[in-house]
Amino acid sequence: MDLHFGDSKPTDEERAAVDALLGPPESSWEGADRDEMRAADLRWARGGREARDRRDLLLPGLHAINDRIGWISEGALDYLCRRLTVPPAEAYGVATFYAMFSVRPRPATVLHVCTDLACAAAGASELCAAVEQRTGPGIRVERSPCLGLCERAPAALAIRAGDPVRTAVSAPATAEAAVLAASAPDSAPEEPPAALAVPQAGSPELTLLRRVGVVDPESLDDYRAHGGYAALRRAFVLGPAAVIREVTDSGLVGRGGAAFPTGRKWQATAAQPDRPHYLVCNADESEPGTFKDRVIMEGDPYALIEAMTVAGYATGAHRGYLYLRGEYPRALRLLENAIGQARARGLLGDDVLGQGYAFDIEIRRGAGAYICGEETALFNSIEGYRGEPRSKPPFPVEKGLFGRPTAENNVETLVNVLPILTMGAQAYAAIGTGGSTGPKLFCVSGSVERPGIYELPFGATLGELLELAGVRDGLRAVLLGGAAGGFVRPDELGIPLTFEGTREAGTTLGSGVVMAFDDTVALPRLLLRIAEFFRDESCGQCVPCRVGTVRQEEALHRIVERTGAAAADDIALLREVGRAMRDASICGLGQTAWNAVESAIDRLGAYE
Amino acid sequence: MTMTPLGIPRRLLECTVDGEPVRAPEGATVLDACRSAGKDIPTLCQGDTLRPKNACRVCMVEVEGARTLVPACSREVEPGMEVRTDTERARHSRRLVLELLASSVDLSTTPRAAEWIEDYGAEPDRFGPDAARLGEEPRIDNELYVRDYDKCILCYKCVDACGDQWQNSFAISVVGRGFDARIAVEHDGPLTDSACVYCGNCIEVCPTGALSFKSEFDMRAAGTWDESQQTETTTVCAYCGVGCNLTLHVQDNEIVKVTSPHDNPVTHGNLCIKGRFGYQHVQNRD
């Protein structure tokens, strides 16, 4: 590869940011100063394949620059490319893919104000206007898709570039508090503990959430004192094949939305002769209305570390990647701490628990792209490519991360493995219904008195869940499964919250979102926001999604104030586009982008 | 003479296309099978010299048992596969994709686009006069070729040809995302500041004319481009000893562009800057 670099040079600060991640350059071949060219440089061409094999450090490298400076200049990008032997055009394509990066100069402080569903219903647009009036040129206000703080809507996240980067969350946000978080992130009031997002916290009936609010999320000892690492010990006693059998017998299916049997996925990965195997934890929870994974990671981070270790052991992986969305600074800090502690105590590393099994976990931060929650887009993102989904087949169990057999599971799915091992597959399968076993987390937000994460055995009805959360009067609609899910009517609250029950009712459980909207919410505006979300988050790779999401948003704009016959033409158009998107898009984003709007038209009569 | 290399014999798999039994070699795509059965399936991003990208989604077919439609260009044939190419569902999807494309970009120089739009009854205008379009101005920053991204359907073929599939220059990439995604060089600068080596292999694979010879672009602008008046002569490049085939496109006794046969086992349609663009001296008549 003959790389071409322009004349732009990095500033000392930019160079330092990259070197802090990669170490100083060893020779001028990979970016050391030409004036200091050493004799060896003239004889050895370093870089090349060795550096190119570290392509997966591109995303961390872009973060390093963006975190330090606030944006990514030509000189900084070229220097990073030189260090990693990545063509600048490709790196530029990657940098411009993510919403949290900028390749144009901008202020060091960016205040992301969430304008997504729950926050929009709680007055996000007024908040944005008020914040913009109060901020000067030193702070950039950006309208953000869901920040995963729906239980405390409206929410804002301030990020100030520097060394180190500073972040502050304001939720529920007032204009004053949000501006304070942006102008003085260090002295902004601390976030409430994660347990406040769990109204049932401390209840003995909880399984998945039983430690949230009970243990100190910073303390490994406290985690162990509350039953931590019992599951891993049992896994070592059973051996990998029997662990997979337990998981299969438990009936656990993926909780990220696709509901694929976890045991089957693990078995298929473990059986691949190709090595190495990888384990990937999908913590890129970006579905609007979803915040359960954040609460687990913030309230019980060691549980995820332990569950990943069990999953790695069962599938024959020695390396796990934890892909965490970039908008979760507190989860990042707690997980980094947990991984460090676990490593120091021999619970990660070359010889986990003295059992001769080597496993370690690396955290990778996303940078603002909903599509990276799609499993193959996530692989591309980790590998340092644009987060575009791959076409399947081949499936990840065969060719996943770095082209190797990979098991990818969502946070909630993994955490379920712990009770499966401690209580046994049969006892676990006895929870819930025949078709949907175990406990399930629901993210309840919107027009309810006690928004938050609820844990219920599968089989409770939507009405029972809303009752628990204190649904307010005048309920107009409930969005199930997030923006990719569907709306149901207030007279459908008898729907059982199971995979089979929601399927029978013509809707989906998705990622466990239950968002209630009362009659003060303007439905057409809400649908427009959903359409806008998908248009923003489409990766742009395939035509049905790239152009279809735009055409749908345009049609919804046209009918935002119209109903009945006046809207009929555009609704017909929406249906035709939606059908082609569902049939012909490469991945789930395009295939489901029209679900919620369609259900609002058909079930709620949104434009009648 | 063009030689067709013979590979190792491959097992033949049996499948059906629109109910008719078809035998296709192992590793063949559904598109191969359909074409061997005489089906005319539209394709845009599929390239005969490139790995399928399946980004344009105009070749979608129905496969028994699949939840969604399947891109014929990239899905491999499996034994017993039942493929249906002309169902209402597949036709709907193709019609919509053609409408979405034609409403957002200029397909006037895309071979067969007009024919397909008619065949499938596509009406790109029904999205209204305010439908978002790319609306890009042609980028003319060098004397060899023009990038007219208003015609770009983002098929990724130029990216693949410039990258690890052929040229290894990696000068082109997709930047931005969603509807704002575009083809660009590093830092979105002019071509002359980029890693481009002007091999023109991206022009060779471009299915829409978004990338074209400056000569062709200028003649089209002047209204003098007339393919019916052109002759094509394949010869051997005289610049070096590799022996690449050149196809000279000649109009009014002037070479107007140079391509290379895709089935040539040496070049597979690829050339270097000299072979592709270095033809002026041939017609220097002073």
Image: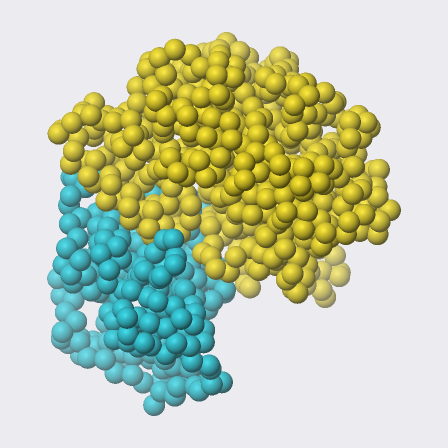
Chain colours: A yellow, B cyan
Q: Residue furthest right?
A: A354
Q: Is A174 rendered above or below residue A349?
A: above
What residue do we see at 30% from left, 35% from top? A598
Q: Quadrant of the C terminus of chain A?
A: top left
What residue do we see at 35% from left, 12% from top? A474
Q: Quadrant of residue A530?
A: top left
Of residues A248 and B145, the one nearer the viewer is A248
Q: Quadrant of residue B87?
A: bottom left
What residue do we see at 28% from left, 70% from top? B19
B94 relative position to A465: left or right: left
Q: Quadrant of the N terminus of chain A?
A: bottom right
Q: Position of residue B261 (x, y in %)?
A: 33, 78
Of residues B151 and A56, the one nearer the viewer is A56
Of residues A376 and A56, the one nearer the viewer is A376
Q: Is B19 rendered above or below residue B195?
A: below
Can you see residue A540? yes
Can you see residue A72? no
Q: Position of residue B20 (x, y in %)?
A: 28, 74
A578 relative position to B122: left or right: right
